[in-house]
Amino acid sequence: MECQRRWRWFSSGWILILGVFALKETQAAHHRHVGQFTAVGTIHSLLEINGISFMDDVEVGSYNNAQRKLNIKIPWIFEALGYDYITQRRHLLVDHEQHFRWVIQYLAKNDTNLDSRNHTGQLLADCEIDNDIKIKSHIHLIWDGEEYYRIDEEDGQWENLKPEAKKYQHILESPFWTDLRKRYMNEYCVDLMRKIVGYKNLKDNVPPEVIASRRVNPEGSTILSCTATGFYPHSILLHWEKNGTLGVWGRETSSGILPNMDNTFYLQVTLELPPEDSGMGYTCVVEHIELMAPAVYPVPEKPTREKPSTLALGIVLAVILLVSCAGAFIAWRKRKSGMVVMRER
């Protein structure tokens, strides 16, 4: 038993150490670019094309065929790319309109419902680089809200997700569309990202706001929670220590790193302790690129209670409600008394 405990501690320690090194390596080197194009049209015409681009979860630009203009969201990107480069990319997008038009009309013509209703075609693409080397890239093709095909660029094979769409696979695998796909991923996804992230950070780094709490569930177990929110970039490490010692203390669960509305991130890690462990002496240790050193957050000795501000607000609202009800009652009594006086006259 003692041997198993030592082995678990040793394994956890090495995992943590490797994680810290991985954190330092990937913070500045790993980047992701996501692009989405949406085309709406009928069997007769192309009605609209919209495109939007995100890098490291920050919107960098959009395109609409009505204006035939690239809308750059971050001013310094003009400096990073140069006017000629942006103009060239705009021309490429305009040229690609004919490809979207052909796809919409071809698929609409083969639709079983041969009317003039609108159809929607979507292309979702994403790519990732690490130390300037492409490590992942994918494309998803969606028709009228249903995914028909997807491809992992590393594998190079289209995966058919709708049996009735199998008849289109030879088109995707043709030399023309294969070359177009590869050029699209290189020019729009990878090269564009390299130029932008190599010039400046898209978003300022933000340290996490961390709260450690403790509660007891109805079964008698103690639940420790460590919540980190509002941080950027997304890479972060949270682990538990007891009296300054790393170990495996109970059943640990994680929310996973989730996005916030402001393009920052959220993570919660909980630790369920056995009934015989009161939860005393625990700390949550946080590693993030914006923290100069690992930050330690002790778990409160007593279960977390409702904040005084929240309690005070509740009391104020209750008083306001009570006063409002009393005022309404007094006004009703006055009206009733007035009616009685009038009847007596």
Image (tube, rainbow, N blue to C red):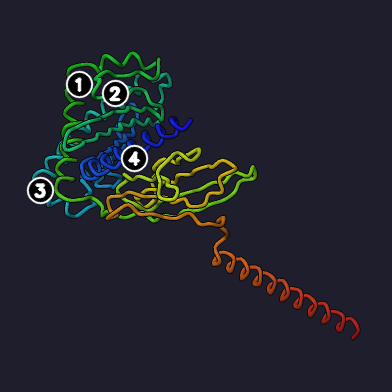
Q: Which of the two marks, 1 or 4, is nearer to us in this view?
A: 4
Residue count near mark 2 (Cα–Cα under 10 Å), binned few <14, some 14–19, many ≥20: some
Whole-percent x, y for residue 76 in the image: 17, 54
**Cα distance between the residues tagged 2 and 4:** 34 Å
Query: Mark 2 — residue?
Result: 151
Do labels 3 and 4 touch, CB within 8 Å?
no
Residue visible at 16% across and 23% down? 179
Q: Secondary structure at mark 1?
A: helix
Please identify the quadrant where the C terminus is shown.
bottom right
The quarter of the displayed image where residue 248 is located: top left
Image side of residue 194 versus residue 336, left or right: left
Position of 31 relative to 283 (above/below): above
Secondary structure at numbered mark 2: strand
| Amino acid tagged 2 | Ile
Between disc 1 and disc 3, whose residue precedes? 3
Question: Label for residue 178?
Answer: 1
User: Looking at the image, which residue sits at the far left?
Assistant: 84
Q: Which residue is mark 3?
A: 82
Give the foreground label among 2 and 3.
2
Using the image as rendered, state which of residue 267 and residue 36 is in the foreground: 267
Q: Taking 248 as reference, is 291 above or below it?
A: below
Mark 2 vs mark 1, foreground winner is: 2
Q: CA distance from mark 2 to mark 1?
A: 11 Å
The mark nearer the N terminus, 2 or 1, is 2
Mark closest to the chain's N terminus, 1 or 4: 4
Q: For the residues carrying marks 2 and 4, which lies nearer the camera in this image?
A: 4
Q: CA distance from mark 1 to mark 3?
A: 29 Å
Q: Residue 164: image x %, image y %?
A: 40, 15
Q: Residues within 10 Å of mark 4 (few under 14, many from 20)?
A: some
Q: Earlier in the sequence, mark 2 or mark 3?
A: 3
Let me know if residue 65 appears in the view. no
Q: Which residue is mark 4?
A: 16
